[in-house]
Amino acid sequence: MAKFPERARVVIVGQGGIVGASVAHHLIERGWDDIVGLDMSAIPTDVGSTSHASDFCYATAHDQLTCSTTMYSIDFFMKRGNYAKVGGLEVARVDDDDRMEELKRKVALGKAFGTNAYMISAKEAKEKFPLLEEDMIQGALWDPDAGLVIPRSQTVAGDLVQEAEATGKLTTFANTEVTDLIIEDGRIKGVVTPKGNIMADYVVVCAGLWGRTVAKMAGEDLPVMPVDHPLLWFGPYNEFDGTGEEIGYPLMRDQGNSAYMRDTGDSTTAEGGMIEWGYYEEKDPRMCHPRDLQSKEEARLSPSQRDLEMDQIMEPLERAMELTPILGELGFDERRSFNGLLQVTADGGPSIGESQKVRGLWYAVSVWVKDGPGTGKYIADWMTDGRTELDHSSIDVARYYPFQQEEEYIEERCYETAFKIYNPAVHSREPYTASRHMRRSPFYEREVELGGHFIKAAGWERAHGYAANAHLLEKYADRVPVRENEWDNRHFWRVSNAEHLEISENVGMVNLSHFAIYDVVGPDHEAMMEYLCVAKVGGTIPVGKGVYTHFLDEDGGVRADLTLIRMADRYRVIDGGDTGNRDFVYMKRMAQDKGFDVTVEDRTTDFTCIGLWGPNARVNLQAVADEPDELTDKNFPFAAIKTFTVNGVKVTAFRISYVGEQGWELHCKYEDGIALWDALYGQGVAPIGVETYANSRRLEKSLRLQNADLLTNYNLMEADLARPKVKEADFHGKAAYLAQRERDHQPAMLCTLVMTDNVDSKGVARYPVGNMPIMDKAGDFLVDSLGRRSFVTSVSYGPTIGKNICLAYLPHDLAKKGNEFVVEYFGETFSVEVAGVGYEPLYDPENLKPRT
Ligand SMILES: Cc1cc2nc3c(=O)[nH]c(=O)nc-3n(C[C@H](O)[C@H](O)[C@H](O)COP(=O)(O)OP(=O)(O)OC[C@H]3O[C@@H](n4cnc5c(N)ncnc54)[C@H](O)[C@@H]3O)c2cc1C
């Protein structure tokens, strides 16, 4: 046995699970050495979820990153001979048309994100999975890459660790619990164990269900909760005896019943000769706080297994027996059946990346087996290069604001997501019902009076539209379509499209309280922001000027899109609600890494903002401002900032537009917000909901959204946001940016497309929501020279132009105005035409450039 070390370059906490094993493997692959892996139990784990996972891998998910990590993992397992690629079914029962539609939607998403799923008939499903009652289903999704990790993910984890140890770069210690973290000056220094301390430069937490208990040692929390997952065994089932196979039939999911099943192959194999049936609780998910997990000694089964109560599963099991009668015919093996604990998260995504509080402390928590190797690769690339192949904003643990790390929030939100593991199909616009009212703007009470249809953005209650504007529906009746299709209309209020037209033809005010606002202060504030931003923000840029700019990553990928105001002693950073916390954490990290003497202060709740836009914005503002002459076009040019008084409130107005129309962002102190609102409302200015601002008008204006259209896997030229000149000063990502600019052309361009036909086969006009694949007329996918497949990154109906508008990166040779393609939505294709290559607004009355 190796001597217990006193120091290491990296310590992995939770070496025995599939995630710890995958992280070790990939770190070594990326050249890391001197790694110590610790597990409080066995290696491979005998207590973690990996020790009893079902080991299903379905390739197709609802987002690109998950599809990518799963496809990588499948390939990884395959190459090792650890994968039975049997395929997987997801069935829709005859009485469940919604599920059938959802499967079609999922197939389209798979096409967008590079998986190979397609729809098959009930007959074909029966041929593939003979245990089904064919007349009970109307069709199925077939995922040909789906399969099973064999012999078990637990075995694979053990093998990976052994192989890593054989390189001499990993040393492991089982039965060695990390009981504390050694942290100095906000940096990880090592771990405490009963066998002694190990000093380390990096600690990677792969502790699965126990992830939060380790995070607590660092004084933070992770939005993750373990939840019971009933797993039952039926047998003996000897259909595949003599084959030597771990599994005979494909995997089968019946999400309408929140259940799945598979056979376990030849009875001589690991779990053989049985049928396994799993269920995700839909009525009363049983959560278990990590601190309540039992120890190995206390637990009757294992710390990650709890006793199963039959009343949990009787109803769905009866339904399962109708669909697959074999379950009723075989005996139920009570001794082997149990509740396994797996993890649900506050937003459905895992907690990956460097701790917000402690440098060098990394998390890889709430990761499924199917994403284990893919996540291992992401962590290793991220720790090595500071970036990953695809944009990682959706999994970055830094995306969580402090309020999202509060215990009550975590419990409420995770409880809600626990219902949604399989069912119902989650709509892209679906607001959470738990943990509402975390943040309210000063205008909230007024908005309630106006009948705001509230959704949530970054914890803020935001009105999609206002019932009080119903009269505008009469005014614009013929231009505001009725969305007949339930899905297209779900969590959508028609009045929003009328508000959109009102801001085009008259004036409107938008609650922008969700802006995240940060002050960068200190002796190096100018040097630091000059280094982070692509645009020139220091030097000759005058105090009081606003600059729209971006942060790039090392490879020139777009990682932030924000506005800065240069002030006498600081920069005020105005950022989107969705992206704010990540950028806040990033700025603090860059200050540390590059040695800038600054502090970054969160001022979000000190200020508020109203956007006042429309052809009549100026006259309305002049009517209430104390110095109306200062507001003329000549005196107040685009991108300028001025301070004046409205209704006794000191307002800092920034002439800028996210909606194409003339107007201003009006910033003031939070407590003064209500007086500003009242002054504008008293003038007769219509309140306009966030749908117009964030979606319909944004797309008419061809404006890009970070984390949707702006991603680190595309560059600024491709997004057509590069400036004509490159500033002299050095900035992060500059070398890559210069090289990208030197190219004859970019591999892809972000284009604006319009749907030229949106009527489906039932004669219903569709208003798509979410991502969609793009194909040429022959049905072939569009792939650029870097291998990136095109898909719709944003879509919305634009009432002013009367069409659905999409944004999508198209390969260079296809990015031509007038080119025609098709998009797929719920199994049907619709024609689209390229209306603009690069930044080319379809509606821009003031001919405003994006915030230059
Ligand atoms: C019944 C069931 C079925 C499932 N089926 C599937 C499936 O079909 N497909 C799929 O993809 N996923 C499935 N999952 C989910 C999957 O099992 C988990 O997401 C995955 O195994 C998590 O792996 P991990 O390495 O993160 O954690 P774990 O396997 O739980 O390993 C964590 C390790 O950390 C160690 N540890 C914890 N705290 C400390 C500490 N302080 N010091 C040292 N060591 C520590 C533990 O001892 C443990 O060994 C299933 C889960 C369950 C419960």
Image: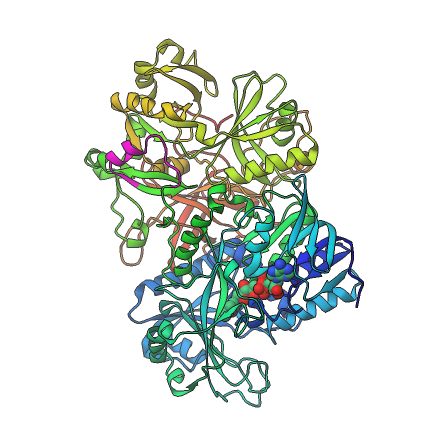
Q: Residue 633: x and y, percent?
A: 40, 14
Q: Quadrant of the N terminus?
A: bottom right
Q: Return the residue nearer the eye: 254 or 536.
A: 254
Q: Which residues are magenta?
A: 438-453
On screen, residue 5 above or below 315 = above
Q: Residue 166: x and y, percent?
A: 78, 67
Please name the colour scheme applied to the rendered image.
Answer: rainbow
Q: Return the residue nearer the eye: 274 or 613.
A: 274
Q: Residue at x 71, y 56 (%)?
A: 27
The image quarter containing residue 657 is: top left
Q: Return the residue nearer the eye: 431 or 357.
A: 357
Question: Would residue 383 be visible to someone looking at this image?
Answer: yes
Q: Residue 844: x and y, percent?
A: 40, 29
The image quarter containing residue 674 is: top left
* 756 with respect to 166 (left or right): left
* 232 with respect to 675 (left or right): right
Q: Is residue 576 magenta?
A: no
Q: Residue at x 78, y 61 (%)?
A: 4
Q: In terms of image quarters, where does ligand 1 lie?
A: bottom right
